[in-house]
Amino acid sequence: MGFLSRPIPRIVLFPLLLTLSGCSGSADDYFDDFESRIRRPLQSELAENDIDHPPPSWPAYPERRHRLQPVADIREGVIDVLAYRRCNMLELIAERNSILGKVAPFSQRLLYELRFIDQGSHCLPSLNEQDEAEQEFRQQLQRVLNIKRAHLPERAIDLVYNSEEVEHQFSLAVDPLDFEQPLQAFPPVLAALDTLIRAMDEASQATKPGIFTHSITSAELEEALATLHHQQEGARLLASMRLVTRHLESNAAIINQRLDTQAVCTDGPNTTSRIMQNVFFRYYADPEKGIQPYLAAIYKGVQEWRSRWLALQEKLPLPPVLNNQQNWLWSESEGYYGRYLRAQQAHTTAWQRLLKECQQMPGSNN
């Protein structure tokens, strides 16, 4: 199998073989430098505004007021609340009814609901059906458990999609990942998202009838959220994906316009084609001087990040505004992720056209 025809997911064939000199070190600089190295020998005057970047455009994160979920209002009298002493739940309810409980962050609100369903579901079978008071409380507790289970997805969605810490991962006010070791700080952020997936798993299990036991702790959740608050690696990865997509499309357009309007080679290699061949092999394909390691890292990071958001999307039903945003971002057929993949293929195809026309495909003797 030829170098240019290998499957993209295996070698991540992106364009940019940037020079290691003359750049300040940011990914933007390397990409701009590489594009200029394509433009010069091809004598391209194609302006950025003239390049047809295909849809979809980047899906903005929905406004907070459209994302917040309703809160079920369960009102019970003092006598009804005191009945929870039969299940040793008065302390738990008192925590929720305190001033702190009323303004608790989404993480603590979800944990309260999980703890309530845990304690309540374990207590329910122990209530004496022959005792009239306990039978009455049993019905009361079952009713409250049903309500809480029905609304639990909303508390989980608030945690995962509406927490300020998670919002940071969709910010547009960030730079792409560093050119050197772009994924160095990424593992802790992935681990934090894995913790939120665990929370969603527990919430999904807690919605089902029967006894439920929760295991995720407050310390685990708060540590995960703190990581997401301090490290915006997810948002920076998405910025890198946008950067890569735009430049891959631009570079492919520059090469294709030249080939469509004027042949680079009519009878084998020439000076222009040899310059382009040098650009390809020296600044892209070279594992030490090229930029392929950066592009491969971005591809790897995107796959890992996407797989987790798709997993979250499958755990519980999302409201339309969030479901649409996630689909527009991650769908392979209609989302920006699909555009990212198609940009890789378009770039690969453009280089194949050029190198084949000039009889300079990898493995040839020219």
Image: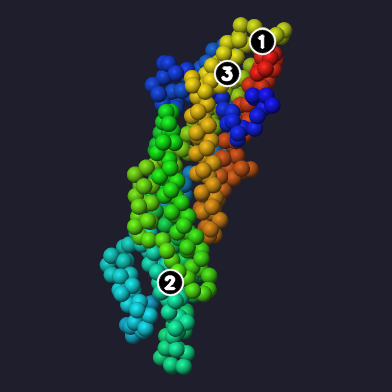
Secondary element at image label 1? loop
Picture coordinates of residue 122, whole percent (x, y): 44, 76
Mark 3 closeness class: few <14, some 14–19, many ≥20 residues within 10 Å: many
Do the numbered discs 1 and 3 sit on residues whose CB atoms are within 8 Å? no
Secondary element at image label 3? helix
* Distance in Å between CA atoms under marks 1 and 3: 14 Å
**Mark 1 vs 3, N-terminal side:** 3
Q: Nearer the viewer, residue 145 or 307?
A: 307
Dot 3 corresponds to which residue? 280
View extreme (right): residue: 267
Q: Amino acid at mark 2?
A: Asp
Dot 2 corresponds to which residue? 118
| Residue at x 51% of width, y 63% of height | 204
Q: Quadrant of residue 71?
A: bottom left
- Disc number at residue 174? none
Picture coordinates of residue 30, whole percent (x, y): 46, 23
Dot 1 corresponds to which residue? 366
Q: Nearer the viewer, residue 151 or 118?
A: 118
Is residue 140 rendered to the left or right of residue 325? left
Quadrant in which the C terminus appears: top right
Is residue 324 rendered to the left or right of residue 364? left
**Mark 2 vs 1, N-terminal side:** 2
Picture coordinates of residue 226, whole percent (x, y): 34, 50
| Residue at x 57% of width, y 40% of height | 337
Pair 1/3: label in front: 1
**Mark 3 vs 2, N-terminal side:** 2
Q: Amino acid at mark 1?
A: Asn
Is residue 36 rendered to the left or right of residue 174? right
* Distance in Å between CA atoms under marks 3 and 2: 60 Å
